[in-house]
Image: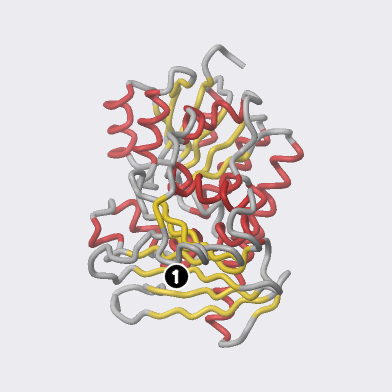
Amino acid sequence: MSEKLRIGVLGLTHDHVWSEAAAAAECQSAELVAAADPNEPLTGRFTETYGCPVYEDATSLLENEKLDAAYVFGSNLEGSQMAIEAMERGLHILIEKPLAANLDDANQMLIAARKNNVQLVVNWPFTWWPQLQRAIKLVEDGSIGTLRSVTYRAAHCGPEALGCSEYFCDWLFDERRNGGGAMKDYCCYGAVLAAALMGLPESVVGLAGGQVKDFLSVEDSGIIAMKYSQGMATATASWTQIGNLTSYATAIYGSKGTLFAEPGDKGKLYLATKDDPEGSEVSVPKPELGMRDSAHNFVEVVTGQRDPFILSRDDYSRDAQEILEAGIRSANLGERIKLPL
C-alpha cells in the first residue's frame, strides 16, 4: 500500500457520499484519487470540490487508476455489483449501509471479500455516535445483565420532503434498486443492532404500509418484530413522520438495567437500574481517533490497527439483510417467517 490509502469513489447517487468523502479528504492517512458516476452534475461537483479525475462508470475507473480501496455510494443494487468488481481486483471496500438490495447479493459480497482477502466495511452513520458506542460496550461488559430486547425507530418526513437529491430519491423509490422502500432504508438500523447484539432471531413478523405517500410504489412505513428465545427486538421505519420526536433513539433492555441512547453525535446516554429506576446519565468518553468517523476507522481497519467495529462488520450487516428480507416477505404474505431463510 502507498503512504496514504488511495481511494476511488464508485457511485455518487447516495447523498451520504458527500459527508463521507469530506471525512476522507480531511484524513491525513487517506487520499481521494477519482470518482465514477454516469451523472455529469455529480461528477462535476466532485471534480470542483476535490480536483479529482472522474469517469462515467466504475470499470473505467478501476482499469485506469492505482487504488488501495474503494468507497461505494451507488444504489443498493448497483453498489453491491461495483463492490464485488472492486474486491475481485483486490481492493478493500467501504460501502454505505445496508450493504445490498437483497440477501443473495449480500452473500456474494461476503464470498468475494473472503476469496480476495480484503476488508468489507459497512458504514452505518450511527456507528460514530459516542453514546451508542458506549452503550454497546456496556452491553458487552454485562452491565445490564442478560440482553432481552433492542428497539430502534428511524423516521422522518420522507426523502423528497427532507431535501434529498433527485438522484438519491430516484433509486430509493425503486423497489428493485433499493430492495424495498422505507423498510429497507430505515428498518435496517434496528435490524443490524439486533443482529449484532442478539444474533439472528428465530422468526420475524413484518408490517408495511403506503398510508400517506400515495405517489410511491413502495411502502412509506414499516415495522419488523423479531422473536428470540431470550427476548425480542423491533425495528421501525417511517417516511411520514412530522417532527423529530422519538426518531433515531436506541433502547436496550437487560435483566439488570435499561440503556437509552439519544440520537446524534452529541446525544446523551442514560442507564436505569432497580436501584435507580428513573435512570441517570452515563459518562461518555471522547472516542479514539479511529472511532470518530468512517475515514479514520477505515484506514485503521485496512492497515490492521484495529478490527472492524461490531456495527461495521460485514457478517452482521449480512444478517441484517436476512432479517430485512424475512420482514418484507412477512409483510407481503401476512404471516410469520422463520429464520434462517
Q: Position of residue 59 (x, y in %)?
A: 54, 35
What's under tag 1, amino acid-wise?
Thr
Quadrant assignment, res 146: bottom right
Q: Residue at x 74, y 40 (%)?
A: 114
Left or right: 336 in relation to 251: right
Quadrant assignment, res 83: top right
286 and 305: which is toward the camera: 286
Name the quarter where the C terminus is drawn: bottom right
Q: Position of residue 302 (x, y in %)?
A: 61, 28
156 and 289: which is toward the camera: 289
Q: Secondary structure at mark 1?
A: strand
Left or right: 66 in relation to 23: right
239 and 265: which is toward the camera: 265
320 shown above or below 83: below
Q: Residue at x 59, y 53 (%)?
A: 143
Q: Which residue is most to the top?
A: 3
11 shown above or below 151: above
260 shown above or below 41: below
Q: Which residue is most to the right?
A: 115
Number of numbered discs:
1
Q: Residue at x 45, y 42 (%)?
A: 128
Q: Which residue is most to the bottom?
A: 334
Rate crowding at label 1 as few (under 14), some (14 to 19) or many (20 or more) other CA atoms within 10 Å.
many
Left or right: 239 in relation to 68: left
Q: Residue at x 44, y 70 (%)?
A: 236
143 and 133: which is toward the camera: 143
Residue named by callout 1: 236
111 shown above or below 305: below
Q: Position of residue 13 (x, y in %)?
A: 38, 46
Name the quarter where the N terminus is drawn: top right
